[in-house]
Image (cartoon, rainbow, N blue to C red):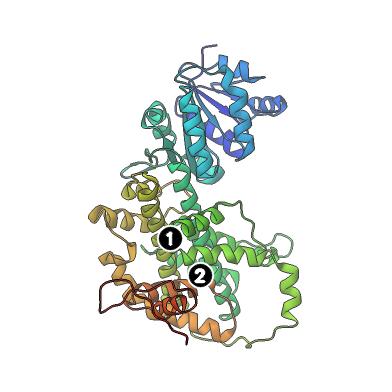
Amino acid sequence: MSKAHFGLIGLGVMGENLVLNAERNGFSSVVYNRTYAKTEEFLKGLGSDKAIQGAKDLQDFVDKLERPRRILMMIKAGSAIDAVIEQISPYLQEGDLLIDGGNSEFRDTERRVADLESKSFGYIGMGVSGGAKGALEGPSMMPGGTKTSYEAIESLVCKMAAQVEDGPCVTYIGPGGSGHFVKTVHNGIEYGIEQILAEAYDLMKRVGGMTGTQMADVLAQWNATEELSSYLVEITEVCLRTKDPDDGSDLVEKIMDQAGQKGTGLWTVVSALELGASVPTIYASLNGRVMSSMKPQRIAAEQILHGSAIKPFDLGSSADGMAPLMDAVVLSCMASYAQGMELLRIASAEYNYNLHLPSIAQIWKGGCIIRSRLLKRIQDAFNADPQLSNLLIDPWFAEQVSRRLPGLAKVVAGAAEAGIPVPCFSSTLDYINSYRTARLPQNLVQAMRDCFGSHTYQRVDKEGTFHTEWLD
C-alpha cells in the first residue's frame, strides 16, 4: 500500500471523526492508538473500506507516512502529550510535523514549539472546536506555531474545516502557543454564553412558571434574530423541548444541577487576571459552575439562610420574545464576546502574537461551539477599526447597549428582589455601567492605599506624584 498523507494518534471520538473528515477530503491516513485493539475496532467499523491504514506501534506508524510527515495528536493534554512526543521523536526526521489538536495550556505549547523547532521538527498547537459532529463535518481550527509549519498543513486543514461564505474556518493564528490561547478564550466565551442561557431559563421557569416547551418556543424566536441566532441558542431550544421517554416530563428537570468543566474557562480567567483584562461576565460563568459543584452545601444552606420569597416581575410576553429578558441575554452575550476579544487584543500585544481579530471572528462563524450571526458584526467592527479598544463602543454595538440597557437593569433588579441569582446578567450590568462611567470611586481606594501604605497618588488638577500624611 502506498504511503499515507496524514497520520493520527489517538482514536477517541474526536480523533476518529477528524481522520474520517481528512479521508473524505482526499487525504489517505494511518492511525495509531495506544491499545491496538481500539485501532482494529475502528478499522473494522467506521474506518472500513476507506483509505485508512492501522499501525501496531510508532515505528510502523511513522514508516507508513509520506514525508514530510504530518501527524495529528488527539490525546489528553498535559503529560500525555509530552510522553508521546518523547516516544515518537526518535523516529522523526527533519521537516516532519507534529500537531497537538487537544486543549493544551498555551504555555505548554510555547515550550514544545521551541523544543521541537530546535530539533528541526515542526510543531503546531491547534485548537479544534465543534464537538464530534463538527470534527466529522467541518470544525473551526485555530493553528499556532511557525508560519512554515502552518504552510505544511494548510491544504489539509483548509479542506477539513467548516466552510462559510467568506472561506474556510481556519487560518494561521500566530507564533508559539497562540492557537491554543485563542481556543482557550473561545471556551471562556462559551462558558459565558452557556451560563447566560441557563440564567434566562431559570427566570422563565421560576418567575414565569413556564414549561420546557413554552421556554423552547421563546428560544426559537430568539434564534430567528440577528442578535441571538447561534448554535448555543439552537441546542438550548432542543434541550428544553426534549421529554423524558419514561414519563413524558421535561428531561432537563431530571438532570443534576452540577456542571462540569475541563479547565479552559479557568485558564481564560487566570490569563485575564495576569494581563489586566476585565472579564467579569466570563468569570461569573466560571464561578457559576464552581457554585454548582457545591450541591451538598447548597442543600444544607437552603434550610438555614432565608431570603426573599420569589416575587413575580415582568419578563415580557412570549408574543414579543420576552423583550426585557431578551435584552438581558443579548447584552450579556455581547459582553462575553467583547471581553474575550479584549483579552485577545491585550494578549496579542503582550506576547507578540500579532493576532488578526477579524480573521479570528471569521473562523468562529462556522463549525465551532460559539458560532453565531453576531460574529459577522464582530468581524465588521474590527475590520472597520483594527485598533478598536472594546467591541461595545463600535457604533452598531453601542446602539444595542443604549437601547437594551434598561431591559437588562430591569431583569437584574427583579431577580435581586426575587432572590434568584443571575451572576452573568448582574456582572454584565456592572461591567457596562463601569465602562461608561468616566469617574469611578477608586480615587478613595487610592487614598486609602496612600494612607496605610504610602503608595502615593496622582491628582486630577496637578501633574506629578503625591503623598499625604493622613494620620496624626
Q: Secondary structure at mark 1?
A: loop
Q: Is residue 47 visible?
A: no
**Outermost residue toward the left?**
384
Which of 351/16 is in front?
351
Q: Residue 230 at what x, y percent from top left? A: 44, 57
As drawn, 274 above or below 254: above
Q: Which mark is residue 348?
A: none
Which of 227/263 is in front?
263
Q: Residue 253 at what x, y percent from top left? A: 67, 67
As drawn, 37 above or below 229: above
**Residue located beneath label 2 in the image:** 424
Q: Is residue 287 left or right of residue 114?
A: right
Q: Is residue 306 visible?
A: yes
Q: Residue drawn at (23%, 55%), measured in percent from left and top?
A: 384
Q: Residue 398 at what x, y percent from top left? A: 30, 69
- Nearer the observer: mark 1 or 2; the answer is 1
Q: Residue drawn at (36%, 32%), measured in percent from left and top?
A: 147
CA separation in Å, label 1 and label 2: 20 Å
**Outermost residue toward the top?**
1
Quadrant of image for the N terminus = top right
Q: Residue drawn at (31%, 50%), measured in percent from left and top?
A: 358
Amino acid under disc 1: Gly
Amino acid under disc 2: Cys
Which of 110/256 is in front?
110
**Residue located beneath label 1 in the image:** 276
As drawn, 279 above or below 454: above
Image-quadrant location for residue 441: bottom left
